[in-house]
Amino acid sequence: MNAVDICRAIECQHAWGNVVIPEFTWNDLRIDMAILDVKRKYVKGFEIKVNRSDFLQDTKWIRYSQFCNTLSIACPEGLIKTEEIESPFGLLYVTEKKDYLGRHQTEWIKKPKSFNSPRSLAWFYRYTEV
């Protein structure tokens, strides 16, 4: 399973009625996927990890919480343990099970908690100016 498979699985789970922004960059930060719920004015951030060493070496992903309401790590099933992800962050497994269209299914191992940041949409307004 690769990052593209994981992106597709997340997008299929969250895309209905939302804006999906893959690899969004703001200043020196680049998040793998941001999903904007325009109606609720809510941003879900996802950092994708496909191997363990990438997860262990990456210390900047926590900084993405400054422009998201929630932030989760998405990875292949079993790659990261629940206790390795501190609250309020989430952990989403992408499984080898596929739906009838051949897309990988997802399973929340640890649901993220909202940061309720009043500035969480500031980056999106800047993005729409481009």
Image (spheres, helix red, strand yellow):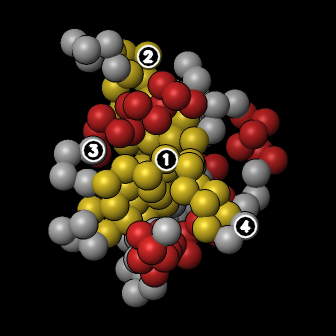
SS for tag 4? Answer: loop
Mark before the other along the chain sequence, 4 or 3: 3
Q: Where is mark 1, residue-wise? A: 22
Q: What residue is rendered at 55% in x and 75% in y?
A: 66
Checking the image for residue 28, the label placed there is 4
Question: Label 4 vs label 1: CA separation?
Answer: 16 Å
Mark 1–mark 2 distance (CA, rounded to whole Å): 22 Å
- Type of amino acid under label 1: Pro
What's under tag 4, amino acid-wise?
Asp
Q: Which residue is mark 2?
A: 96
Q: CA distance from mark 4 to mark 3?
A: 26 Å
- Report, in whole angstroms, how far the alpha carbon at label 3 lies from the one at label 1: 12 Å
Q: Secondary structure at mark 1?
A: strand
Mark 2 or mark 4: which is in front?
4
Q: Amino acid at mark 3?
A: Ala
Foreground: disc 3 or disc 2: 3
Q: CA distance from mark 3 to mark 2?
A: 20 Å
Mark 4 near mark 1, Cβ–Cβ under 8 Å? no
Q: Which residue is mark 3?
A: 15
Determine if residue 27 is in view.
yes
In the image, what residue occupies the spot 40% across and 31% down?
8
Q: Is residue 39 left or right of residue 5?
A: left
